[in-house]
Amino acid sequence: ALQSGAQVISMSIGLDFPGLVKRLAEVEGYPTDLATSMALEEYRANVRLFDSVSGLIRAQAGIFGEEAIVVAAAGNESKRHIDPKYEIGVSPPANAVGFVSVGALEPIQQGKRLTVAYFSNTGPSISAPGVDILSAKANGGYSLMSGTSMATPHVAGVAALWAEKLFKTTR
């Protein structure tokens, strides 16, 4: 994307840390403390990887004069519907240095107001609508989908429009 001159990069991938710990412990049979340690190493490796990507983006900006913005989904591991305090922090890659993390919002009061979606990880840079978003399905058609990956394109789209405006203004 950088080599093609992209000014906005949208990423809807992530690491489900609690899910990884659970899978390692319950499915693969590792003791909980070992499963947690193994998942933590995966978490650290992901953060380091995407911090490096952020550094590459900054370095490339020094060469070409324009820095791309990376917009990334914050993750869907929180469970506020079970307990309002059950909040998981923004997960990789969205928590990498320089990335804009995006949380999901859902409508309340017949859609006239928005609130943080029960599943949206806490502490994102910005939030956007992410519940019951009409999306293309694999193999054709459309369906309503929910998640921070549904909110991220809203933010990336606004960032692209802003970049286009700045590009036209400065050229």
Image: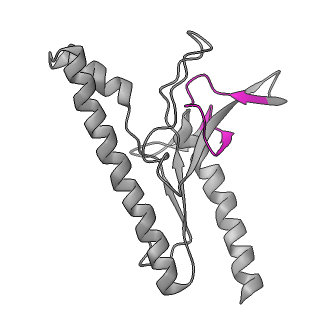
Residue at point 62%, 31% (across, down): 132
Horizontal relation, residue 169 to residue 90: left or right = right
Specify the quadrant of the image occupied by residue 118.
Answer: top right
Q: Nearer the viewer, residue 92 or 167?
A: 92
The answer to whether residue 142 is magenta is no
The answer to whether residue 71 is above or below residue 86 is: below
Count of picture labels: 0
Q: Nearer the viewer, residue 111 or 70?
A: 70
Indicate the position of residue 158 as horizontal and vertical percent values.
69, 59
Indicate the position of residue 117 as horizontal and vertical percent values.
63, 27
Indicate the position of residue 78 as horizontal and vertical percent values.
52, 23
Residue at point 55%, 9% (across, down): 82
The answer to whether residue 28 is above or below residue 53 is: above
Residue at point 66%, 62% (across, down): 159
Q: Quadrant of the N terminus?
A: bottom left
Highlighted range, magenta: 114-133
